[in-house]
Amino acid sequence: MTTPSGTLLDRRALAARREALVLRSAELRARLGADSGVFQPVLRLADRARAGAEVLSAHRPAILLAVAALLGAAVLRPRQAVGLGVRTVAIWQFAQHVRPVVRTVWRLLVARKPRQP
């Protein structure tokens, strides 16, 4: 049989133990957050891959139609298809080189623009 004072001591001990566990959990969460920075590039890549897969699955008919059209063009007119592919790759590479410059100019223009009340 427990006495009222024994119950009070048990409650205090449990409260102290709980507080210690909460503090330890917070410390472990902080350490895990700091250590997980190594995995950020891999996790970002996985998120982008998943988002791409979601887009593909959401637009499956349109993508299949586009692929079928490209394959049909490649079979019927291979030279034109190769030329289109080469031009597409060149435009993509150009866009990749120009994008940082455009982004910087855009930020400068937006930063200069006075805000109206």
Image: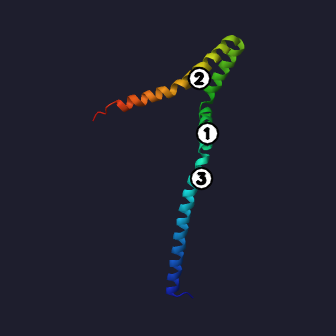
Q: Gap in Å between the C-alphas at discs 1 and 2?
A: 21 Å
Q: Amino acid at mark 3?
A: Asp
Of residues 6 and 89, the one drawn nearer to the viewer in this rendering: 89
- What residue is shown with label 3? 35
Of residues 26 and 75, the one drawn nearer to the viewer in this rendering: 26
Q: Is residue 23 above or below residue 77?
A: below
Circle 2 Cα neighbour tier, 10 Å, few/some/many (<14 / 14–19 / ≥20) = few
Quadrant for the N terminus in the image: bottom right
Visible residue check, residue 66: yes
- What residue is shown with label 1? 45
The earlier-in-sequence mark between 2 and 3 is 3
Circle 3 Cα neighbour tier, 10 Å, few/some/many (<14 / 14–19 / ≥20) = few
Q: Which mark is residue 93?
A: 2
The earlier-in-sequence mark between 1 and 2 is 1
Quadrant for the C terminus in the image: top left
Of residues 100 and 26, the one drawn nearer to the viewer in this rendering: 100
Q: Nearer the viewer, mark 1 or mark 3?
A: 3
- Name the image colouring: rainbow
Q: Amino acid at mark 1?
A: Leu
Q: Position of residue 45 (x, y in %)?
A: 61, 39
- Residue 77 left/right relative to 93: right
Visible residue check, residue 77: no
Q: Nearer the viewer, mark 1 or mark 2?
A: 2
- Residue 54 left/right relative to 116: right
Q: Position of residue 26 (x, y in %)?
A: 53, 61
The earlier-in-sequence mark between 1 and 3 is 3
Circle 1 Cα neighbour tier, 10 Å, few/some/many (<14 / 14–19 / ≥20) = few
Secondary structure found at label 2: helix
